[in-house]
Image (spheres, grey):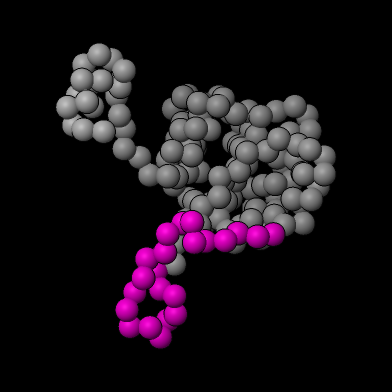
Amino acid sequence: MSQAVIEQRVRKGVVRDRVAVTSNHAAAYAARDSEVDVVAAYPITPQTPAVEKIAEFIANGEMSAEYIPVESEHSALSALIGASAAGARTFTATSSQGLFYMYELLYIASGLRLPIVMALATRLPQRRYASTVTTRTWHPSEMLVGL
């Protein structure tokens, strides 16, 4: 799309305010706009900014959710299973390592068909092998996730 077309759409009101945010903050804004009832999360890099932004929304009154600070990812998913079973909209954010700690509870949540929304933040590897001198940036489509 050309710059002229974009400017024309802005003048017509088709495109309004634009905000540049990181993917972590985008997940936090999505959770806020989805009006979730319960957020249980354990801050772990690289998803910490998402949880911090949600806590900021709750503290400022922009989000009326119950934030449960837990001691591990296992506890976060346990809390969300209970909240979701009670009918609450639930959200958590974790990292790939955190998802590993939630692993044994994933079967319970999916077996009960509980709707739990989870933002998964992962690190993008910069090198294929540590001994390689040249670096190669991986595209997310090259990353395979399997359970």
Q: Residue at (79%, 38%) from the top-left corner? A: 113
Q: Which residue in the rendered view is the most extreme toward the top?
A: 12
110 up-or-down from 8: above or below: below
Q: Residue at (53%, 33%) from the top-left corner? A: 31
Judged left or right of residue 21, residue 90 is right
Quadrant including the N terminus: top left
**Image coords of residue 41 (percent x, y):** 59, 46
24 up-or-down from 135: above or below: above
**Image coords of residue 86 (percent x, y):** 78, 29
Res. 89 image quadrant: top right
Res. 35 image quadrant: top right
Taking the image as drawn, is residue 83 in sight?
Answer: no
Taking the image as drawn, is residue 106 in sight?
Answer: yes
Quadrant including the C terminus: bottom right
Q: Which residues are magenta?
A: 126-147
Judged left or right of residue 97, residue 47 is left
